[in-house]
Image: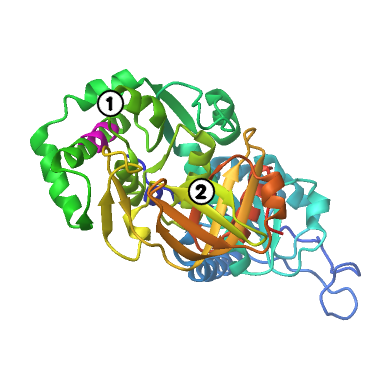
Amino acid sequence: MLTLKDIRVRLKPVVVAVPHYRYRIGSVCAPDVEGTPEYTPLSREHLKGLSETIVEELKQKIGGEAVVEKPFIIGHPADFNGLYEELTYNIDAIIVYLINCMRPDVFALARFRKPLFFIGYGYWGIRDYIGYKHVYLVRNSEELKPYLRALRAKKYLERSKFLYFGEIPSFSAASSMWDFRNIEEKTGLRARQIEIGDLLETYRKVDEKKAEKVLEEWYKGFEKIVEPTREHLIKAVKLYLTIEEWLNREGANAYTVNCGRLTEKEPIVPCLPMAQHIDKGIMASCEGDISALISMMILHAISGKPVLMGNLNIKGEDEIEITHDVIPPSMGTRKLTVRDYHGRKFGVTGYTPLEKTEVTILRISRNLDKLGVITGKIIDSYDKTHCRISIRIKVKSTQNIYSKAFGHHHALVYGNYLKELEAYTQLTETQLIKLND
């Protein structure tokens, strides 16, 4: 099963060293020399050594954020044709270095339709010259890193597939995107719908001993169990294993469940299975909310962290609340307190307080063309029963959140990833809406 660890951003350094001059150094773009002395082009050996030095320095500065491929040197106009052999589909971006080259030669790089990054201070005006919307100027490798994480998110969606369990649309997530073809065209993310009846047929065939073995592992993460019986817990594990079987069967790595329809057929909820899956890098959203799932996948890929989702509530001029029932255990400050579902004497949910830390909250619009983002800080979290957790978050202002948020389910991750989301919207030609400005 694909996980974020399988996604590596791959960069192709291209060193363009086609000289300005043929015979003598003229007066335009000249180095600090007297008169017009003869021009001696850089040798291949010199360019190779220089390119290797540049690439090693880049590798050291970006660390494990990306794989840096062998540099390609363009020392003659005819060398551009060699890039057709070098640039595979798996290359995510080109890092361009210009050495005494003429800018008309750089224009040819746009034909490969990959993001072009120029690192340093000497490239002002080149975006307008090339006339290609995916030219990015960064002053140093630190400014490059948010783009690398955004490229990882873009690639993660393109390589991923999610399962939708239940009928479409979900009656409780009306603002979500439902068009699978549109999703794939805009993000590359593939999808497959699985009927609840098919899910339950597999559920009823899960081996009891296998479920008991998994439950013994889960017990290690429990602080205490309040309402659920062992039978309730075994049902939760069976659902967890059922979903995993379907993911493996379909080659998928994320999912959403139309929970309302599931509970009509069988008194089980996917809350704890989802929480456990998210900690394994399998993003999962509630209530068949595909927009929430995509938002979770973007935040997960950008941050490398687990993500939760929940209902957005406005609590005042500078405070919001996120409430729901799926809490990845690794996001908590204690082991899980295991409870029932909404105090209804069936189902299994888990509660743990969250860290009081900075967070990024995201939801993508129904048309997948806008990302609404909120940044703030968790000031408290508590067991609300219905929903299991309530997260209080201090924000700058709720005025725009109230009037412009895209639906009620939002994804939440620890940390501030505003720069990465800005980079993501540039790379995907979408719009970032900062809701708490």
Image location of residue 30, percent across then percent down? 85, 71
Image location of residue 345, percent across then percent down? 26, 39
Estimate how packed mark 1 is, as few (under 14), some (14 to 19) or many (20 or more) residues with alpha carbons within 10 Å: few
Q: What label does residue 411 carry, if any?
A: 2
Q: Secondary structure under badge 2?
A: strand
| Residue at 32% over, 41% down | 341
Image location of residue 312, percent across then percent down? 55, 48
Tag 1 residue: 266
| Residue at 42% over, 66% down | 355
Estimate how packed mark 2 is, as few (under 14), some (14 to 19) or many (20 or more) residues with alpha carbons within 10 Å: many
Asked if residue 202 shows in the view, the reply is: yes
Confirm whether the magenta stretch covers residue 240: yes
Q: In this view, does 112 lie above or below 166?
A: below
Image location of residue 222, percent across then percent down? 22, 56
CA separation in Å, label 2 and label 1: 27 Å
Confirm whether the magenta stretch covers residue 393: no
Asked if residue 90 shows in the view, the reply is: no
Mark 2 or 1, closer to the camera: 1
The region drawn magenta spans 238-243
